[in-house]
Structure formats: structure tokens, C-alpha cells
Image (cartoon, grey):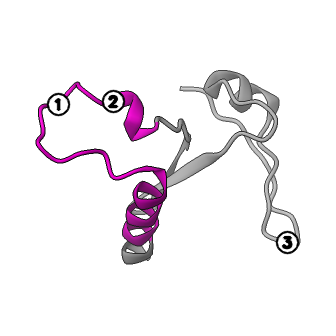
Amino acid sequence: MAMVKSRISSKGQITLPKRVREVLGLGLGEEVVFEIRGAEVLLKPWRKVPLEALRGRLKSEVPFPGEAEERRVREGAWAREK
């Protein structure tokens, strides 16, 4: 396991070191998520896969609600996690 260090700025920001960006395949403007696991935090790339792309993989009688409804439900779930 490799360790890479970064410093927290006065604004609470960090710069992801080049090695971390390379390992995660991150480029300019891409998003990441932080998964909190007790006293540790896991940094992951946020890969957006629209539900529409998954259509037909699982059988369902319920039609796809659309991007706006998908976003509303996702943001509601995030708000409940806080």
C-alpha cells in the first residue's frame, strides 16, 4: 500500500497529488466522493451512469421516471444521509 501526503489549506481544501489522480483516472473537472468508514475516509471517483443506460438489464413494470426525477430522488437520499 502506497501512502501519499497532502496539506489542508486555510480554506479546508486539499490538492489531490498527481499520483492519486493517475491511480483513480481523474481528469480536470471530474468529481469524487468521500465514503466515511468510522475514523477513515475512502476517496472514490464519481462515475455517473445514468439510469437510462441500465434500462432493460432488470425486469420491471415501472417505467424510467426521467432524469429530473432521478436527480430529485438521489439528492433526497443524500440529504437524509447528512
* Above/below status of 9 relative to 16: below
Nearer the camera: disc 3 or disc 1 = 1
Disc 2 to disc 3, C-alpha distance? 39 Å
Question: What percent of the width, then of the height, locates residue 77?
Answer: 37, 67
Which residue range is magenta in the image?
A: 50-78
Question: What percent of the width, then of the height, locates residue 7?
Answer: 81, 55
Q: Residue at x 44, y 66 (%)?
A: 72
Which amino acid type is marked by label 1? Leu
Q: Which residue is mark 1?
A: 58
Q: Residue at x 23, y 26 (%)?
A: 56
Q: Secondary structure at mark 3?
A: loop
Q: Residue at x 30, y 45 (%)?
A: 64
Which disc is residue 54 wearing?
2
Which amino acid type is marked by label 2? Leu
* Above/below status of 15 relative to 68: above
Q: Is residue 10 a member of the stretch shown in magenta?
A: no
